[in-house]
Image: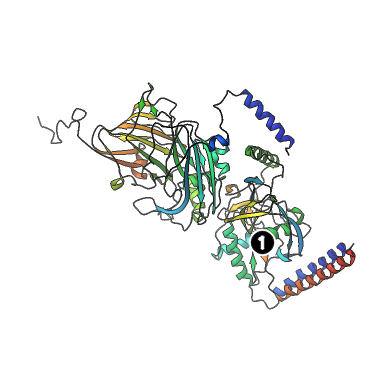
Amino acid sequence: MHLTLLEAALGAAAAIAVPLTAAGIMAGSPVDPAMQPAATVVVGATTLDFPLPGEFLAVGTPAVAPVERAAVGAFQIMKRQVSLADYRRCVDEAACAAPDARMVQADVPVTGVNWLDAQSYAQWYSKATRLTWRLPTAIEAAAAAAERFSGDAFSAAADDPANPAVRWIRRYREEAAAKRPPDPKPKPAGYYGANSKGVEDFAGNVWEWTSTCYARTILGEDRDVVDSTENCGVRVMEGRHRAYMSTFVRDGKSGGCAVGTPPENLGFRLVLEDRSAVAAAAARLRNLVDTIGTKIAQENGK
Amino acid sequence: MFTRRQALLGAAATAMLAAMPPLAAAANETEIAALPREKVALVAPPYVHAHEQVATGGPKVVEFTMPIVEKTVVIDDEGTEFQAMTFDGSMPGPMMVVHEGDYVEMTLMNPETNPLPHNIDFHAATGALGGGALTLINPGEQVTLRFKATRTGTFVYHCAPEGAMIPWHVVSGMSGTIMVLPRDGLKNEKGETLTYDKVFYVGENDLYVPRDEEGNFKTYESHGDSYADTVEVMRGLIPTHVVFNGAKGALTGDNAMKAKVGETVLIVHSQANRDTRPHLIGGHGDYVWEQGKFANPPAKDLETWFIRGGSAGAALYTFLQPGIYAYVNHNLIEAVELGATAHFVVEGEWDDDLMKQVAAPGPIPMN
Ligand SMILES: [Cu+2]
């Protein structure tokens, strides 16, 4: 019962936060009125079971990603993916490279953008809106995706360490089984609908860049992390399934380090850094609610 | 704990094994560990590390180490800069030589300073995409692969990460050759031993360099920057450069290959991506393994031989006349315009019997 209470309280905080942020931007802001910041959704502080990104080796053989119980602080993320129309403004101002997007109507998300393009856009967009925007981390993407998050595409079936081909054939079959008819044409914003957090179009046909680097991690006998090699030339993408892409790749089929059926399109959405006083107030309110929630929980636990 | 599917696969594998002809006894780890080991230092092409042509002992484990070097190189006399990816710093990668039955133990290193993941696919190896599926390494990692050299011949190795990265890495320079010699050396069609005094390794690369609006070759700050434009050129299938040993003219002038009249030279020629047709102008291929596989008798007295893209071939020739020989890809447009020309400087005595200028050039007599 206390859980329901807590959720209700958090929901209320989120509901307050969105309009407050929007109001804060409008009031006396020097921003070009045409460059209104995109609508955001507040993803409240949460704890989730997060399959760690990257590849894992346990005693020399590929292992399934460990799932970590992880806490994510509250953050604001774009309700929709960055649109082709918005991205074009960055290109027009010579701050972004042209996307390899298919020529379609303008109300679609931008596609055909690599990680570096997304970074350039975040920089330009921050300047244009006088706010601080950045790519989400993989765990933030997971928190925002909520029930639509799927992580790595492959099952955790036991493989034969003496025969690596068992794993290759299993993965190949899983990939073939998961194959769906290609539908790469970007859809109008909102086409795939909103998830329980109000985040739209996650896990449609546009995969989203994150700031998280690919890593290969060596696990010990107890599946504890022994060693890890990060490769920031490859970043984690979240979507229908997780993919790993070289930062310069604009076409999902190029792979680079892709696992599973290649992503149909590469796009992104941005996180709004909590900088404004309003956002800080909202965060304080959320903390307060958290504290109350914890107290309720403790009371109930007695 | 095995899944049901694995149990089924296991059964299928057992059935397959039963149906197969008996193989040479497979060695276990203890037996392999007991074999003599040899560490070989690789040398940059067109040269090849010292090796025995006829093996004196039994099978060994031959250890090689190759760092992967990503760097900017100049590929022609106009100073065109190219974002190269290399095995061991050379384009092509160094040639390795072992004997049939030896174990090749390759340690591949991807230094942290590289931005890209790489691997190695040995056409001489059996299984795991030639080892590619077991060797993909990120910057800051290294991997060691062992495979048994079960088939003789000259075989390409190349980088093969996934998807569109494969052709890009290959045409960025990531290919080389391994030669697996029969334990008792090379043989002619009668089974008589053939030997060579020198071996040269000519690796041919087709390169695809993007141009700007004015038609000048573009330069890029990094491999990633060059990727999108390069793929566009690659898809046109017409290379801007076809070079031996990494650059136009790399095997000419001071760097021409050298031999003497009477010397027998083995020329190994690889092309990891595209067909080519080596020709020694003024000479021949006495014995040519066009497909590069020594279990097949060599063709004799060839004028031009054909190397299929994705393979390496070998030609044995004894120089009979001194002079400068051009060794070309006999698509002469590629040889002359795109760079596929190397030179041999051969010293020795001229043989009038083979050729003599009976009358020097002069005016055509008017009568
Ligand atoms: Cu490579």
Identify the element where label 1 is drawn: loop
**Quick check: A6 left or right of A242?**
right
Q: Position of residue B200 (x, y in %)?
A: 35, 39
Q: Quadrant of the N terminus of chain A?
A: bottom right
Q: Quadrant of the C terminus of chain A?
A: bottom right
Q: Is residue A102 visible?
A: no
Q: Position of residue A56 (x, y in %)?
A: 64, 50
**Please, which residue is most extreme toward the top here?**
B190
Task: Report the residue marked by disc 1.
Answer: A136
* Of A16 and A110, the residue lying toward us: A16
**Please, which residue is most extreme toward the left here?**
B367
* Of B119 and B152, the residue lying toward us: B152
Q: Position of residue B189 (x, y in %)?
A: 38, 22
Identify which residue is drawn at 41% across, 36% down: B276
**Quick check: B34 left or right of A281?**
left
**Residue type indicated by callout 1:** Pro
Q: Which quadrant of the structure image shows residue B205?
A: top left
